[in-house]
Amino acid sequence: MSGKSEKVIELTDITKSFGSGRAKVDVLRGIDLTVDAGEMLMIEGPSGCGKTTLLSIISGTLKPDAGKVVVLGKEITKARNRNLAKFRARHLGFAFQLFNLIPSISIWENVSVPLLIQGIKGREAKKRSIEILKEVGLDDRSSLLPNKLSGGQQQRVAIARALVHEPEIIICDEPTSALDGATGEHIMTILRQLTAEKNATVVIVTHDPRIHHFADRIVHMEDGKLLKS
Amino acid sequence: MYRLALRILFADRTRYFTLVSGIAFSTLLIVQQASVFCGLMSWTDAILRNSRAEIWVMDTFLEQVQLPRPMREIELTRVRSVEGVKWAVPYFHRVLPVKQADGQYKMVQVIGLDNVSLIGAPRNIVAGNLENIRSPDTVMIDDYAVERISENFIAPNGEKRDVRLGDWIDINGSYFKIGAICDANRPIYGGPYIYMTYKHAQGILSPDSRTLAYMMVATQEGADIPTVVERIKKETGLLALEHEDFSWKTLKWFFANTGIPLAFGNTVVLGLIVGAVITGQTLFSFVTENSRILAALKAMGTSNRVLLNMILLQATSAALVGYGIGVGLASAFGLFVIPLKKPPFILLPHTLIIVFIVIFVIAMVCALLASRKVLVLEPDTVFRT
């Protein structure tokens, strides 16, 4: 694992636009950003400022029009989609705003998805899934379907899924926006604690000021630019 | 991941039921119609299935076995003299009326067999004895004739019952006693079969009528059958065909001159369309509804190849279950109708294999079309609400 001062994410002069001609919208305009290993970075800003696009580019799910993205020392900007998918599967964990749990399979099976993607199956996958569920306090509910859980519990499952394969970077998209204040606080406490234990780097996009105090650093975005960092 | 794909499919019960039902219905329709078609086609050469010969000799312009063109009796002698022919016997075939108790007529097919050998008689005798037809004015009828003639049969004592051994029937104005009952293949048209000796058959018609419909020929031991066929054609000017070739000639005639293949073909195509539309639509909506989860899987690092395989596996699974149910239902239909002998039903292994391939291809094509949506899905979709 990288040391605390090591830069795990480096973005240089990133631009991204959507559409063409008169309908062209410049979403990111020359973004420079670095994130250190083990750091919890929050990106906040008003709707439409480009923070989700920035998160997509950091996570390698979207390619910029120009600029350079280096994650864990690997320049992902020019990587082929197939290699990028492998890279995400191995090094990144995701927690989404709407959890995106598969409703038809049990909680532990949902948690095991990143392991299955990497080819880890059967008892090993189940063992590791139950272990991480224990860490988020849901091991006693591992056989239930996601719809039997509350929103907060589902987000804890999503966090367990993001951590189960021990990735170096966790990408979180509005992890508390669908939750009430107390539940959001609880979720962030768990996330903070687990990622600190594993020295994982966390990048969170949020416009929920209630969770700002968990961040090591907050960057503000407006009109496709970082205002301060 | 593949087990996961199946779990996702099975959990969506409504859509899974629709998918399997569509494929099962399509399979049922295709297998059932194809089997009835095969059964119907087997009726076209029923005469040949009942009477087997190495070589059949007939008029040169004959089109199919149900439309005989009687020849001169002298032709029999000419065929017998061809090198390689062991024996040749006459075969009478004519559609004639059987008079009913109410004065109405039912058409039957009278088959006249060689007086001495009775070659060409069906083997499965269910009542009486084939040898009985050597007796004066005695015939053998098939089980279909029993069914047809019994519809308006009244016994001499006034009792209304089925015909049976010992009853007399009026064939074209001549009375014949039923001396045997056989189980024969049914004809596609022309009515049931009544077997008698060639001499008795000749007696039904006016003396100047030609009665030699076909000649059944056997070759000498060691003789090459195709060579003998060619010799007969060359030396007599008649048409000679090996048994299977005669069957094919008849089958081809029905394909070319009747609307039967087209009618059944339409239903089969309808089955294919129903299967394709339901499978395609269901898979497409399945993929659309799960696009957010599929995008999440993509974001988490699932490759397009794995996602494609997952969808193909789902389609294959539904296709296999649907195919199994469809074949099961079609077989149940067959088991029900085979004893009734109508509609005719022959489920060939070829039908099962071809339908399996067709259903599988439909499922795969639909899955590939549906998966296009997944393949072009950007993984960052998952971040866009």
Image: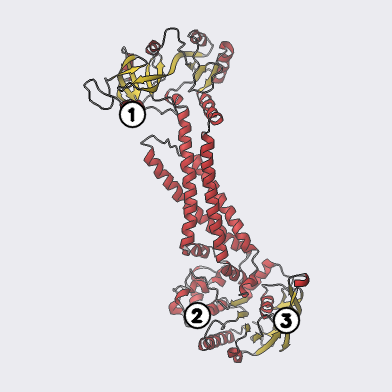
- Counting labels gives 3
Look at the numbered disc 2 and give the secondary structure of its residue.
helix
| Front position in the image: B162 or A69 | B162
How many other residues sit within 10 Å of disc 1, few (<14), some (14-19) or many (≥20)?
few
Residue B219 in the image: state x and y as whole percent: 50, 16
Q: In which quarter of the image is residue B184?
A: top left
Q: How far, Cα to Cα, is label 1 from label 3?
A: 91 Å
- The residue wearing badge 2 is A151
Camera-nearest label, 3 or 2: 2
Question: Which badge, 3 or 2, is on the more N-terminal residue?
Answer: 3
Q: Mark 3 points at which residue?
A: A10
* Residue A106, above or below A7: above
Q: Image point 63% across, 74% down: which residue?
A: B384
- The residue at which mark 1 appears reads as B147
Does the rendering let one see residue B155?
yes
Write down the chain letter for disc 3. Answer: A
Q: Give the Cα separation between the discs numbered 2 and 1.
A: 73 Å
Image location of residue B357, percent across then percent down: 54, 46
